[in-house]
Image (cartoon, grey):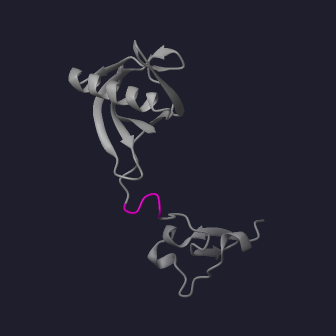
Amino acid sequence: MLLKLIKTRPMISGAHCEVWEINPLLEDRLMDEVFVLYEHLPAELIYPLTITLHGIRIRGRDIGWQWDQPEAEQEVYEYLRTIQLSGEEIYLEVCVPEPDLPGYPYIDRHPDDYPIVLTDEKIVLLDDLDEEERPEEPIYEPFDKIEYV
């Protein structure tokens, strides 16, 4: 099982985060929102979670999340404990939200065959030239075929 801790709003002392359950078979669901002090906020990696009688832990340390709704904390704890008792491993990915770009991450915004213009022994992207500087017939070359001087 994979949980995502998405840092939505950084503050002076910590970050407001969303806890998501990632489920490729059904659909992802928001479990709750939490506030995490920077001293408890792990780096942006994937960590194994352990559910103990004392709470949710990363590498033996309490996660230190401040839940928006106390009843949601108990529900999430019970749900994760049930998952762990079934023998499934639980992982937490700490990350930032994906950028709001149409088609992200499936659109390559820097393709190898992007049009470029060779002018005066310089390599210039076509979009970087002003209208009057653009040649009537630009030279299109893939990046891997250009000889740099």
Look at the image and say whether residue 103 sits in the magenta stretch: yes
Name the spot of residue 75 as percent of width and height, x first. Answer: 27, 27
Residue drawn at (34%, 24%) of the image: 77
Of residues 103 and 131, the one drawn nearer to the viewer in this rendering? 103
Q: Nearer the viewer, residue 124 or 2?
A: 2
Farthest residue in the front direction? 86
Along the line of sight, which residue is nearer the eye, 9 or 128? 9
The magenta stretch spans residue 110: no
In the rendered image, residue 7, in percent from the top left (x then y), is placed at 38, 34
Residue shown at 75% from the left, 66% from the top: 148
**Residue at the image position 67 percent from the left and 70 percent from the top:** 143
Q: Residue furthest bottom?
A: 137
Residue 120 at x, y percent in the picture: 67, 73
Q: Is 74 left, or right, of 140 in this rendering?
A: left
* Residue 29 visible at all: yes
- Magenta segment, prevailing SS (helix, strand or loop): loop
Q: Report how many numbered discs are placed on residues in the image.
A: 0
Q: Is residue 122 shown above or below 89? A: below
Give the magenta-colored segment's residue range: 102-106
**Residue 16 in view (yes/no):** no
x, y (%) of residue 21? 37, 40
From the viewer's perspective, tell me whether residue 75 is left or right of residue 107: left
Q: Quadrant of the C terminus?
A: bottom right
User: With 46 as the anchor, is 147 left or right in this view?
Assistant: right
**Is 113 rendered above or below residue 135?**
above
